Amino acid sequence: MLAHELLIRLAALLGVLCAVLVLERAFPRRAQRLSWRCWLADLGLVVIASLLVRLLAPATAVGAALIAEKPGA
C-alpha cells in the first residue's frame, strides 16, 4: 500500500479536481472569465504546498526527536 502512496494521492487529487471542475461549470456562482488562470494558480499552490510538506514534515520529526532525546527535556 505504501509503495503506491504517491499514485493513490495523485488519483484522489485528480478525482476531486475533476469533480470540482464539473460542478463549477454546471452551477457557476458568477460569470466565468479566464477561469483557467485561477485553476493554474490554484494548482501551483497545491504543488508548492505538497513539496513543502514533503520537505518540512520529516525535518520537524527529526528535530522533535533530537529535542526529546536531551536529558531533562
Image: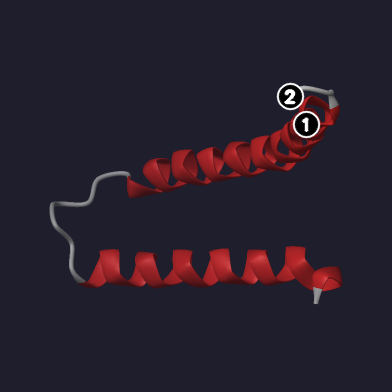
The kind of residue on which mark 1 rests is: Ala
| Figure check: 20 above or below 56 | below
| Figure check: 49 above or below 71 | below
Is 46 left or right of 58, judged from the image as shown? left
Q: Residue at x 57, y 70 (%)?
A: 12
| Figure check: 70 above or below 10 | above
Residue 51 pos. (x, y %) = 69, 39
Is 45 left or right of 71, judged from the image as shown? left
What label sits on residue 73 in the rendered view?
2
Q: Are marks 1 and 2 in contact (CB under 8 Å)?
A: yes
Q: Residue at x 84, y 23 (%)?
A: 70
Viewer-closest of 54 and 57: 57
Split into 4 quadrants, where in the image is the C terminus? top right
Of tags 1 and 2, the one toward the viewer is 2
Residue 43 pos. (x, y %) = 52, 46
Is 42 left or right of 61, judged from the image as shown? left
Colouring scheme applied when the structure was drawn: secondary structure
Res 69 → quadrant: top right
What label sits on residue 37 in the rendered view?
none
Q: Residue at x 74, y 32 (%)?
A: 64
The kind of residue on which mark 2 rests is: Ala
Q: Which residue is mark 1?
A: 68
Mark 2: give few (<14), some (14-19) or many (20+) Cα within 10 Å.
few
Mark 1: give few (<14), some (14-19) or many (20+) Cα within 10 Å.
few
Q: Secondary structure at mark 1?
A: helix
Viewer-closest of 66 and 36: 66
Label 1 – label 2 distance at C-alpha: 6 Å
